[in-house]
Amino acid sequence: MDGRTLLMHQVMLSDGERLRAYDLALRESINPGDVVADLGAGMLALSFLALRHGAGHVFAVEGDPDTAAMAARIAESNGLADRLTVVRGDARKVRLPVPADVVVGELMGNLGPEEEMPETFAEFAADNLAEGGRVVPGRLTTDLTAIQFDGEGWGVWSEDFLGYDLRAVQEHAAPGPQLHFFQRDPLPLSRSVPAVTADLGAKAPSASGEVHELPITRPGTLHAVMGSFTAAFTPGVSLSNFPSYPGCNWAVWIWPLRHTAVAPGDVLGVRLHRPESVRDVAEWRLDCGIVRRKERT
Ligand SMILES: C[S@@+](CC[C@H](N)C(=O)[O-])C[C@H]1O[C@@H](n2cnc3c(N)ncnc32)[C@H](O)[C@@H]1O
């Protein structure tokens, strides 16, 4: 396995909140003896949780050949040959020998759908989910929020940096997304608005094209629109990359904007564009326009 892939798994396995959410959800979703399919099984973290909660057999589906080989070695060295089968292949094409009572997977990207979780779950479930089967998580949402984040990220290009004006830099920065781990929480200038909602296991929704309105709820300086995801598991259990938590392995997606004074009553119109190379979150785009309160009255 290459070092980059190993490091990615190392970071994911160190994200305790992520594992905690799956642990709680699988505890509630698995009945003793259930067949569980783990889509994008990686180093088998979710497969282990499924076994711990009583799965009779786990099919660990992994598309990357080196990762699948490593997963098979881990299974073997843990004496799991009779309870876990590593299936090497794209989960969208796999046919299991028996239907799965529970389908679980973690394919969330910074924005939510860019690792094609909705499509992968839908295609897999159509061929392999037992009638009455459960899907974990059940729903994936992409939220957009207008934010101000002084002194951090795009917010650093301000009119007062050590008493000097850095706004000239704003003129030279081409629009494009940034991934950001906040040092301090940003100031939300609007509520979070769901831009894409996917019921996992069902037909995947279109992830672009619709215009959404972000009504400004407090006065401030608009620095960016933030994209984040929420995965909803069981009632009361969800996982999101905003607000962040210690050890969170997902940055949020930031679309920087020219600094603009805004006030309640203004409305930011936004439209998310999904690119051809859907998996590259740096290729996603946002159209933005602001309607001033004065123009609306
Ligand atoms: C975010 S990691 C999650 C790994 C593991 N489930 C965990 O929670 O630690 C996603 C894994 O899914 C695999 N993957 C992505 N798309 C896939 C697909 N369509 N079919 C099978 N595996 C896939 C990747 O190779 C990677 O190992």
Image (spheres, rainbow, N blue to C red):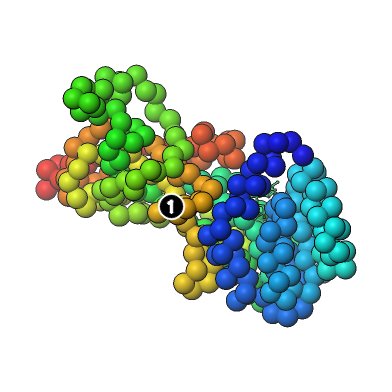
**Left or right: 218 in relation to 32:** left
The residue positioned 51% from the left and 51% from the top of the image is 247
The residue positioned 83% from the left and 48% from the top of the image is 69
**Left or right: 170 in relation to 49:** left
Q: x%, y% of residue 91?
A: 73, 53
The residue at which mark 1 appears reads as 244
**Left or right: 1 in relation to 22:** right
Residue nearer the viewer, 4 or 253? 4
Q: Which quadrant would residue 39 be assigned to in this image?
A: bottom right
Q: Which quadrant would residue 124 be assigned to in this image?
A: bottom right
The secondary structure type at the circle numbered 1 is loop
- Say if 66 sits above or below 166 in the image: below
- The reply to whether residue 30 is in sight is yes
- The reply to whether residue 92 is in sight is no
- Say if 259 sits above or below 267 in the image: above
The residue positioned 71% from the left and 51% from the top of the image is 42
Amino acid beneath label 1: Ser
The residue positioned 35% from the left and 42% from the top of the image is 225
